[in-house]
Image (cartoon, rainbow, N blue to C red):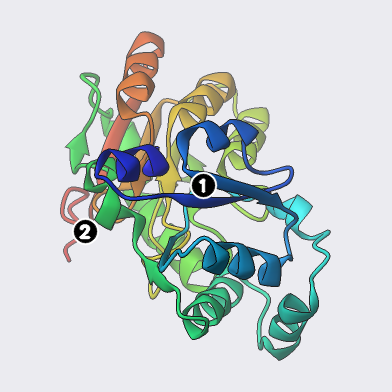
Amino acid sequence: MVAERAREAGIRVVAVGFTGNTDPTLADHVDVFEMVHLGQLSKCIKFMKANTADSVVFAGAINKPKAMDIRPDLLAAKLLFKLKGKGDDAILSTVLDVFESHGLNVGDPLEFVPGLATPEGALTSRQPTRDDLEDLRFAWPKAKAIGEMDIGQSLLVKAGIVLAVEGPEGTDAAILRAGELSSKGCVLCKVYKPGQDMRIDRPAAGLNTVRSMIEAGGTCIGIEAGRSIFFEQDEAVALAEKHGVSIIGLSSEILGLGS
């Protein structure tokens, strides 16, 4: 979707996908495409430079358990060796620095597609219930805390009990794990991690998030407004409406928690 919007704006799109993570049909929506393995950092940079790219935008998800089997090239291996931590923020910030050191400006995806930003307030006609909002208020500061520790972006909560904390498995798997512990009624709270670089790994939700919540018997998706990306918003909202799931763009003000 980011690539399509960029092309609509007249921008030539040179795309790199990752084997086992990127849908190969992305090639149909860009000008030039190359599939590489995770860890082939030099190949990514050489491909972009060879195709006269001057800016880079990161969009889409990486399967983190699969990423643990990374086979780094020499450049990536040097990067990993120098890291002081192995969390998302430490790795991704270093990757950004490497791209920029090779003359590639790293941009924020929402600069290209501001319409993908999650709006504040209810996206569905079904409003979160009082219990949903209580759980979101309970979850918000805790989700911020695990984000600050670079653990994850999401919590699943029911009746003031944390059912699942997002780890390397990702949001959808965390939702399904929560569903195994609670028959119905959990809420998802997904937030921007304090201090996170806005150019990479923004919190995101979309059609698959709604599908996972339906399968888990969840009742409400709360995701931080303005700082997150909501893909396929119209389709996701329509599906949520059909199954009685509410979606709300969160802020501390909406939750009555102050700034």
* Residue type at tag 2: Leu
The answer to whether residue 179 is left or right of residue 214 is right
The answer to whether residue 62 is left or right of residue 238 is right
For the C terminus, the image quarter is bottom left
* Residue type at tag 1: Gly
Q: Quadrant of residue 222?
A: top left
Q: Tell me if residue 197 can be seen.
A: no
Single out the mark in the foreground, 2 or 1.
1
Q: Is residue 27 above or below residue 161?
A: above
Residue shown at 42% from the left, 49% from the top: 13
Residue shown at 51% from the left, 47% from the top: 60
Q: Is residue 230 above or below residue 65?
A: above
In the rendered image, residue 164, in percent from the top left (x then y), is placed at 60, 46
The answer to whether residue 81 is left or right of residue 5 is right
For label 1, the residue is: 60
Residue toward you, 3 or 127: 3
For label 2, the residue is: 257
In the rendered image, residue 234, in percent from the top left (x then y), is placed at 30, 23
* Disc 2 crowd, CA 10 A, few/some/many (<14, 14-19, 20+): few
In the rendered image, residue 168, in percent from the top left (x then y), is placed at 67, 55
- Count of numbered marks: 2
Residue shown at 20% from the left, 42% from the top: 119
Gap between marks 2 and 1 measured at Cα: 31 Å
